[in-house]
Image (cartoon, helix red, strand yellow):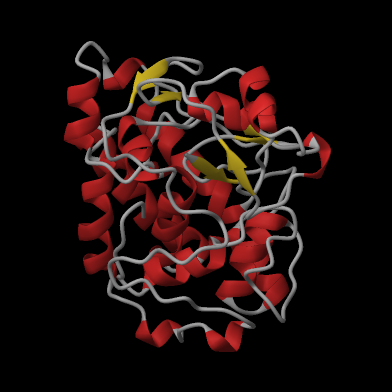
């Protein structure tokens, strides 16, 4: 078996994803320098019996299933004692036969109607071509149902409407980035990549979900990502600076923009803008 290095990977994080020890991974790759891993580099993985996966921050059963090209039902069947609502970072899951390592940052998914948009913003779809909000909501609210309650999904929808009205940001854009950043999971874990990024939109040091105040915290999470926080820009500020949504998405994800190549990750996620464009067009693909 092999593993293709993705953006942000280290040997330790790869070993955790694969459910093996760091020492075993290093032994299987004697010529690899840990400090010089490259996106797209292929590593050998040692034989380790039944495939395992170690939960990392932000994972849900649905997202793990999508990463490995398996159905949610198959993953649940392989882990009959696991409660989807109480997953813990470091918890080890069984992976059923037929799982894969998922899609790498630099690769175009080879399924659904995903389009490999690339280059400057002018090469990406005109917003006039985007799917309707009703269409996008119908597609994406189904994904939210894997980890949110019906009442929480209703709160997400009403909060999108309210924040769109307040900010002037298209509802489709807000929805797209919610799904892009968290899959719509109100309980998504906060990430720390040089800055604290919590909540539905992984905002810049904003709020996270408060089960004691679901309505207020869901609304504020969406406000933080859309309108910004005292510590960082939201979608509204990114659009004002760059003048188009695709450059704004790159700025939101990376902080910097290579206007000639919006798939340049600038230290973040290479396919971020391309995925956002496909979401807005109403395209579907495995792992979306």
In screen coordinates, is 209 left or right of 80?
A: right
The quadrant in which the C terminus is found is: bottom left
Q: Quadrant of residue 188?
A: top left
- Above or below, comparing residue 275 to residue 119 in the picture: above
Q: Residue at x 67, y 43 (%)?
A: 8
How far across and how far down the image is residue 206, in percent? 61, 37
Q: Residue at x 19, y 33 (%)?
A: 74
Q: Quadrant of residue 227?
A: bottom right
In screen coordinates, is 37 left or right of 238?
A: right
How far across and how far down the image is residue 169, in percent? 49, 66
Taking depth in this image into account, of 56 and 6 the one nearest to the observer is 6
- Above or below, comparing residue 194 to residue 265 in the picture: above
Q: Residue at x 28, y 35 (%)?
A: 152
How far across and how far down the image is residue 276, in percent? 47, 65
Taking depth in this image into account, of 71 and 247 the one nearest to the observer is 71
Q: Is residue 212 visible?
A: no
Q: Is residue 282 visible?
A: yes
- Above or below, comparing residue 167 to residue 230 in the picture: below
In screen coordinates, is 105 left or right of 34?
A: left
Q: Residue at x 65, y 21 (%)?
A: 22
Q: How many marks?
A: 0
Taking depth in this image into account, of 112 and 168 the one nearest to the observer is 112
- Above or below, comparing residue 149 to residue 2 in the picture: above
How far across and how far down the image is residue 282, in percent? 30, 70
């Amino acid at each position: 078996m092999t593993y293709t290095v993705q953006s942000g990977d280290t040997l330790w994080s790869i070993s955790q994803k694969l459910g093996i020890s760091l020492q075993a991974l290093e032994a299987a790759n004697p010529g690899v320098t840990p400090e010089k891993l490259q996106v797209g580099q292929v590593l050998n993985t040692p034989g380790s019996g039944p495939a395992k996966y170690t939960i990392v921050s932000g994972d849900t059963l649905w997202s793990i299933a999508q990463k490995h090209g398996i159905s949610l039902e198959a993953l649940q069947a392989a882990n009959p004692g696991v409660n989807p609502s109480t997953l813990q970072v470091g918890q080890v899951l069984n992976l059923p036969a037929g799982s894969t390592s998922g899609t790498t940052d630099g690769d175009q998914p080879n399924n659904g109607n995903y389009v490999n948009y690339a280059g400057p913003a002018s090469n990406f779809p005109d917003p006039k071509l985007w799917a309707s909000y009703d269409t996008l909501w119908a597609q994406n609210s189904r994904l939210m149902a894997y980890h949110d309650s019906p009442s929480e999904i209703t709160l997400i929808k009403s909060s999108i409407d309210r924040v769109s009205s307040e900010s002037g940001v298209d509802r489709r854009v807000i929805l797209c980035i919610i799904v892009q950043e968290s899959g719509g999971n109100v309980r998504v874990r906060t990430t720390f990549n040089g800055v604290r990024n919590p909540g539905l939109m992984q905002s810049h040091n904003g709020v996270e979900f408060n089960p004691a105040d679901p309505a207020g915290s869901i609304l504020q999470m969406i406000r933080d990502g859309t309108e910004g926080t005292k510590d960082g820009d939201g979608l509204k500020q990114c659009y004002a600076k760059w003048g188009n949504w695709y450059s704004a998405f790159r700025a939101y994800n990376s902080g910097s923009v290579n206007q000639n190549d919006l798939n340049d990750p600038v230290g973040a996620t290479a396919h971020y803008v391309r995925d956002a464009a496909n979401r807005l067009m109403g395209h579907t693909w495995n792992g979306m």
